[in-house]
Each structure stands twice: as structure tokens, then as C-alpha cells.
Image (cartoon, grey):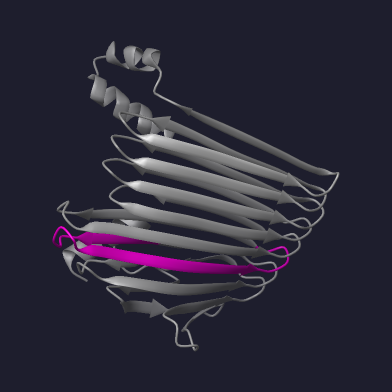
Amino acid sequence: MDSIQKDLLLQIADLHGTPEGAFNIRGDGESLGRNSTANIDIVSKADGKSGIDIFIKPGTKKESVHIPVIISKAGLQEVVYNDFYIGEGADVVIVAGCGIHNCGGVDMTSRHDGVHTFYVGKNAKVKYVEKHYGEGDGNGKNVMNPETVVHLDEGAHMEMETTQIKGIDSTKRVTRADMKAGANFIVKEKLYTHGNQVADTDFVVDMNGEGCRADIMSRSVAAEQSVQHFVSTMNGNAPCHGHTECDAIIMDSAAVTAAPCLTANHIDAELIHEAAIGKIAGEQLTKLMTLGLTEKEAEEYIIKGFLH
């Protein structure tokens, strides 16, 4: 890997080199390295699609999988399909994400669309971390469209932490989940947009099993002329508990739309939604500025804490 690729890998996966355990590193449409372990097998798709299948054996504990994607070739566009099969009773961490470095011309677009499908077995536990990051000379466009599909078996647990760091001109973030009895699904989204960037977030969760729980939380900052749309749909089809929350800071000439939607199809479905959009409070800025910070430094400090 060259210095640009190594820097992208550090930004999206906190990796300074080849990770331990199971991994698949994809760069500019090709494999830059792959490793399977005794409990985790990574194989190329056999159906002709671009992507991989990850098989995690039942009972696997305290292991991780790294599957970052980096694009440093201006104008490269790809669609990748990755499927995860997590065995019963497993407990693993999966680290994904995509970084793009685009120094192409004004009309040059680099784009990565990733479709990740999770089949989480009974009583299995997964923590999924995904970061998106873009950089370049400001001429070419960076586009990322992540789609995540989650199937949670009985008693399964999945926690998603998704972060869009900076530099993504356009993104459509789609998440679909269905849950069986006793399953638990937690999503923590952090999003920052600026310039003329556009970000669309679309969650749909079908709570089909008795005693399942879902908690969808989105925190975002929209600055300058950027636009954000947040849609979250929860369908309570059984005795269950669901909570969806959107908390956004709006700055400059930005625009934010939040549209939570709840549907209770069972008398014992308990569903809650919260949505808050507002500017940084003046007293917060004043307090920090009395400590010696400029207004811009104070804003950056507040945003950093908000998205932490």
C-alpha cells in the first residue's frame, strides 16, 4: 500500500498495518490482503458478484473481523456485496468502513456502494463498527451509499456504530432489520455534513418477535449549505419495545428534515420517537468564549462533544 492508502486505512479502521485475526482489505477494486482463522472463514462470492462471504462458527468468542475498503483511484465506481453468517452463541466484533481519496477533475466521481447482509444466529452477539471518510482536492466528488440488512434470530443481539467523518458529498444510508423473539438491535449513528453535501438516512425495523427491543439513535450536525434527511420507521408486530431518536444541530444555511414513523400492529407494542433540531445555544458559546476560545473554536468544541 502507498502512503495515501495507509492513511485512509488509519482514518476508517484505526489500522497502522495488517490487523490480527480475520481480515479482508479491498483497495481500488482489488484485494490487498485476506486472512481467515480457525473460527472465521472469508471466501470470495461464488455467484459472480463482487464481494465476500464471512462465515463465523457457532460459539466463537472474542474474535474480530476487519473488512475496510479504500479507493484512491479517481473516478473508480463499484458495488460490493458482503454477507455475514454468524453462528449460534458467537460473540464477535466486525470493523468495516470506506475511505475515498479523489483528486480527479470537476466532473470526476469516485463512488462505493456497499451492501452488507447479516444473518445473526440464536443468542449470538455482534458489534458492527462502520466509518466513512472522504478527502481530495475538492474538485472530484466522493459518493458512498451503504446498505445494511440485518436478520436477527431468537435472542440475538447486534449493535451498530456508524460514523460519517467528513468529505462525503452524497450519501444514501439504508438500514433494514427484522427481529425474532428476544432479539435486541441498537444503532448509534453520527453524521457531519458541510459545504453542499447531501445525506439521506433511512431506517426500517420490523419487530416480529415477542420481547424484542430496538433502539435507533442518530446524532448529526449540518453546517454551511448542506442538507440532511432522516427517516426512521418502526413496525411493532408483536409485544415489543422500540425507540427511535434524532438529535440534530443546524448551522449557517443548512437544512435538516426528521421524519420518525411508528406503526403498532399489536396491543402490547410499545413504541417511542423523539426528534430535536436546533442551533447551538448562545449561552454555550458565551461560556466557552469567556474561557479564552474564539467563537469558531467554541463551536468546534461543542460539535466534537456532541458527536462523541
* Viewer-closest of 275 and 183: 275
Residue 15 in view: no
Residue at position x 24%, y 57% in the image: 141
Locate residue 89 relative to residue 248 in the image: left or right: right
Q: Is residue 301 left or right of residue 307?
A: left
Q: Quadrant of residue 21?
A: bottom left
Quarter that holds the C terminus: top left
Q: x%, y% of residue 70?
A: 30, 66
Q: Nearer the viewer, residue 153 or 77?
A: 77
Q: Quadrant of the N terminus?
A: bottom left
Does 307 sit above or below residue 166?
above
Numbered-mark total: 0
Q: Is residue 171 above or below residue 274?
A: below
Q: Is 111 left or right of 274, judged from the image as shown? A: left
Quadrant of residue 146 within the rendered picture: bottom left
Q: Is residue 191 left or right of residue 61?
A: left
Image height of 301 relative to 144, above or below: above
Most common SS among magenta residues: strand
Residue 110 magenta-highlighted = yes
Q: Is residue 123 visible?
A: yes
106, 34: nearer the viewer: 106
Question: What residue lies at 36% left-to-right and 34% top-to-bottom?
Answer: 304
Tell me, yes or no, whether the highlighted magenta stretch contains residue 153: no
Determine the residue positioned at 60% across, 41% down: 260
Q: Which residues are magenta?
A: 97-124
